[in-house]
Amino acid sequence: MTQGTVVCLQHKSEILENNPLGDKFIRDLHVYLPPDYEEGKTYPSVYVLVGFTGRGKMLLNDSAFTPNFAERMDKLINDGKIRPMIAVMPDCFTRYGGSQYINSTATGNYEDYLTQEIVPFVDENFQTIKNKNSRAVMGKSSGGYGALVMAMRHADIFGLACSTAGDAYFEFVYFPGFAEGFHSINGAPAALLGKFWNETERKGKHDFAALNTIGMSVCYSPNPQSELGFDLPFDLKTGEIREDVWARWLEHDPVRLVEKSVENLKSLKLLYIDAGTRDEFSLDLGARILCEKLKKHDIPYIHEEFDDGHFNIAYRQNRSLELISENIEFA
C-alpha cells in the first residue's frame, strides 16, 4: 500500500497573538499529502475539525485497532474509495478546552484564525485547488459544529461541509450537563479548570460536564466586564437558569442559524449531517431537528443515522470522505 506524507509546519498567528488567555499563537499545523503528491499537480483540500478538548495533532494518534486519520486516508485512496486529497488538521485548542471555531472576547478569534489565516497559509504552501468547490470542511461533535458554522457563515471559502454528531438544538445537547456540572463547579469555575490542568488530581464523575459548560460559556456568552471574562448560563448559588445568558447561547445554535444562512447553505455542493441513534448527548435528535429546518427552506442536504453512540465513531469519517470525494471539484 502506498503511503501519503504528513507535514508539520509552524504558523505564527497575528490574530491569536494577543488572545485574552495567553494561549500560544505559534502553532503546529499538520497536513496530510496524498501518496501521488507531486510537483505541478493540484489537489482539493479537506479541513478536519476535532471535538472539544482536541487539537489537530490528535487525529494522528497511534492506536492498535483504529487507523489514525493519515492511515485512513491512505487506505481509502489505495482502495479506490476516494480520490487523492490534501487533509488539513488545524489546532484551535484553548486553555478552556476548545474554541467551537468561533470568535470570542474570552478566548480569541478562532473563526478568523481559521478562515483568514490558516486557509490562505495552506494555499500558499501546498498545491491546492484554490476555490470553494475544491475545499471541504468536516468534523465530529464540536468539530461538526465548527463545520456547520463554516458552511453557514463562510460558504465562500468552504463549498462542502460534513457534520457528524455536531452540536445542534442546544436544549438537548447542553441542559443535562448543566445539572450534572453544577455541583462540580461548586461556585468556583477557576478551581474546576485548575483541576483539569493538574494531571495528578483525580477528576470527579461530573467534572467533564462542568468543564464542558465552562468551555461553551467562554465561546457563547463571553463578557469582558465579568470577573471571569464570561457568563455562566445558571446561577452559581442555586443553579437557576439565567434566561438572558441562555438566550445568548441560543444565538449560536445551528438550528436557529439556518434562517440567517439560507443562501450560503443553498450554495454548497454538499451538506452532509449524520449522528448515531444512541448518541449520549441526543445529537441524533439535534440532527433531525436541524434537517427539518433545512427542509423548510428547501436547502439540499444528506441526512443519515447509524446504530452507535457519540464515542469511538472515527469510522464515520469514511462516509464523510467518500461523499466529499464524490462531490468535490478536482479541477
Image: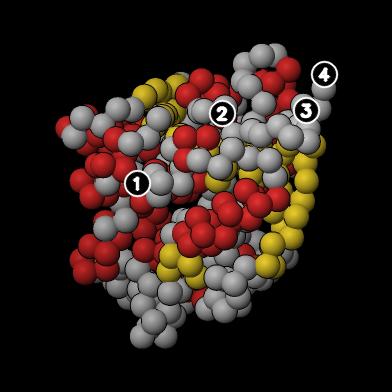
Would you say the residues marked 4 and 1 are in contact, meaning their CB atoms lie under 8 Å apart? no
Residue under numbered circle 1: 152
Residue 86 place in picture, x, y as percent: 66, 36
Query: Crowdedness of circle 4 by 10 Å Cα count: few (<14), some, many (20+)?
Result: few
Q: How far apart in space, not on screen, are marks 1 and 3 (Cα)?
A: 32 Å
Query: Crowdedness of circle 1 by 10 Å Cα count: few (<14), some, many (20+)?
Result: many
Residue under numbered circle 3: 35
Q: Residue at x 40, y 23 (%)?
A: 305
Observer-side mark, 4 or 2, equals: 2
Question: Does residue 59 appear anywhere in the picture?
Answer: no
Q: How far apart in space, not on screen, are marks 3 and 2 (Cα)?
A: 18 Å
Q: Earlier in the sequence, mark 4 or mark 3?
A: 4
Amino acid type at circle 4 is Met
Q: How far apart in space, not on screen, are marks 4 and 2 (Cα)?
A: 26 Å
Give me the disc on residue 331.
Answer: 2
Would you say the residues marked 4 and 3 are in contact, meaning their CB atoms lie under 8 Å apart? no
Q: Nearer the viewer, residue 201 or 263?
A: 263
Q: What kind of element bears circle 2?
A: loop
Observer-side mark, 4 or 3, equals: 3
Q: Earlier in the sequence, mark 3 or mark 2?
A: 3
Q: Earlier in the sequence, mark 4 or mark 2?
A: 4
Amino acid type at circle 1 is Met
Residue 221 place in picture, x, y as percent: 35, 68
Residue under numbered circle 4: 1
Q: Residue at x 42, y 85 (%)?
A: 227
Q: What kind of element bears circle 1?
A: helix
